[in-house]
Image (cartoon, rainbow, N blue to C red):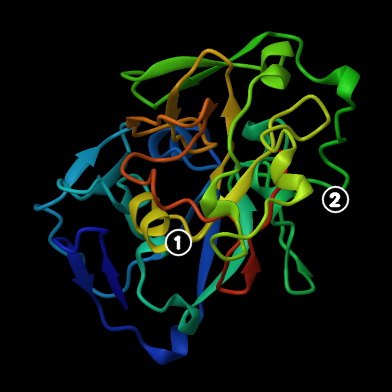
């Protein structure tokens, strides 16, 4: 197995015994994983063989027993270590050709998401329902298929803004929920969201308020481009566009509530988008990777 970062300065290799394949990948949705990486969950598999030298990587410890390792240069998330359990896992998004030895096994720490988080986006792989554990697999019970009950529009939170922050809270900001200004503003349909060729006439969808889902929430989508995968460490990155009438800046942030942040000026748009730093030019909503179809959703 081979893992590498976005800029190519950090690469790691290990031999894998064929009898151990496929390696079981866990989707963890705990607060530490979501806020430390900015994604809705963390998908990892155990690193095989001897422990690699991680001295060249930067490290962030969200707890006494957990450490995240990432590239100093590009910020790619590569490894997560649990010193209490004595485990070292590698992010599946940074693996080279993982189809040969990675199989998604289950969702863990789902209850901390309140609304089901990524387990609602990916309830099955093929025809198999993925087990959803309220906490860890070893210590908690399975959640029933009907959990959580979907909220109606009337039951959605009434607060006017959503708080966003990284794990250490060094970066904090709020996002205004859709309101009258969201309806009143205008923004060109992003080129990266179009399947057609340059020069084709905009569709009815592209002329509409594409950043709104129609049920009181912002629309959202997924991206599986190389830049998003390698920078976040997750195979599919979740992005949600947010419109603000007074903004002339485009900001990209991951739906897991931001780990890295880059602000870039745009002259022709009043949209505010969400994803990781350095990925402003790489959002491609309609894409396919590793058997999972990316699609527009409204979580």
246 shown above or below 33:
above
Asked whether, in this view, residue 49 is left or right of residue 275, the answer is: left
Q: Which mark is residue 145?
A: 2
Query: Can the viewer see residue 21 in this picture?
Result: no
* Distance (Cα) linking label 1 and label 2: 31 Å
Q: Nearer the viewer, residue 94 or 140?
A: 94
* Side (left or right) of 113 relative to 173: right
Q: Nearer the viewer, mark 1 or mark 2?
A: 1
Q: Which percent across, then down, holds residue 141?
A: 72, 46
Rendered location of residue 81, percent (x, y):
31, 50
Q: Nearer the viewer, residue 121 or 283?
A: 283
Residue 166 visible in the displayed image: yes
Q: For the residue labelled by badge 2, is the local secondary structure a helix, a strand or a loop?
A: loop
Mark 2 Cα-neighbour bin, 10 Å: few <14, some 14–19, many ≥20: few
The residue drawn where x is 25% and y is 77% is 14
Q: Which residue is mark 1?
A: 225
Residue occupying image coordinates x 35% and y 75%? 96
Q: Residue furthest bottom?
A: 18
Q: Quadrant of the N terminus?
A: bottom left
Residue 165 position in % (x across, y down): 44, 22
Residue 227, horizontal then vertical, whole percent: 36, 57
Find residue 214 and name its label: none
- Judge by depth and name the residue closer to the eye, 51 or 85: 51
**Residue 285's image quarter?**
bottom right
Q: Is residue 55 left or right of residue 172?
A: left
- Quarter of the image with the C terminus is top right
- Number of residues whose C-alpha sits closer than 10 Å to that of mark 1, classed few (under 14), some (14–19) or many (20 or more): many
Residue drawn 45% across the image and 15% down it: 173
Near-viewer residue (207 or 218): 207
For the residues labelled 1 and 2, say whether their Cβ atoms are less than 8 Å apart.
no
Determine the residue positioned at 63% across, 60% down: 200
Q: Earlier in the sequence, mark 1 or mark 2?
A: 2
């Amino acid at each position: 197995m081979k893992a590498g970062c976005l800029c190519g300065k950090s690469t790691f290799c290990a031999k894998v015994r064929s009898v151990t394949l496929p390696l079981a990948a866990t989707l963890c949705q705990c607060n530490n994983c979501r806020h430390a990486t900015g994604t809705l969950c963390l998908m990892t598999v155990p690193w095989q063989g001897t422990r690699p030298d991680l001295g060249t990587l930067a490290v962030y410890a969200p707890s006494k027993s957990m450490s995240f390792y990432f590239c100093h240069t590009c910020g790619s998330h590569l490894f997560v270590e649990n010193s209490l359990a004595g485990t070292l896992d590698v992010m599946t998004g940074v693996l080279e050709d993982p189809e040969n030895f990675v199989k998604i096994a289950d969702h863990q720490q789902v209850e901390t998401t309140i609304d089901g988080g990524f387990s609602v986006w990916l309830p099955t792989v093929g025809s198999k329902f993925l087990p959803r554990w309220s906490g860890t697999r070893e210590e908690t019970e399975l959640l029933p298929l009907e959990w959580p009950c979907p909220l109606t529009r009337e039951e959605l939170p009434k607060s006017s803004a959503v708080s966003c922050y990284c794990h250490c809270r060094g970066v904090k900001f709020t996002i205004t929920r859709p309101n009258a200004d969201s309806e009143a503003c205008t923004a060109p349909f992003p080129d990266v969201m179009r399947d057609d060729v340059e020069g084709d006439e905009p569709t009815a969808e592209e002329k509409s308020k594409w950043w709104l889902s129609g049920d009181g929430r912002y629309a959202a989508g997924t991206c599986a481009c190389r830049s998003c995968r390698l920078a976040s460490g997750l195979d599919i990155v979740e992005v949600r566009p947010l419109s603000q009438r007074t903004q002339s800046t485009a900001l990209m942030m991951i739906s897991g509530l931001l780990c890295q942040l880059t602000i870039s000026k745009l002259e022709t748009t009043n949209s505010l988008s969400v994803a990781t730093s350095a990925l402003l030019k790489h959002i491609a909503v309609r894409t396919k990777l590793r058997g999972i179809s990316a699609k527009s959703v409204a979580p």
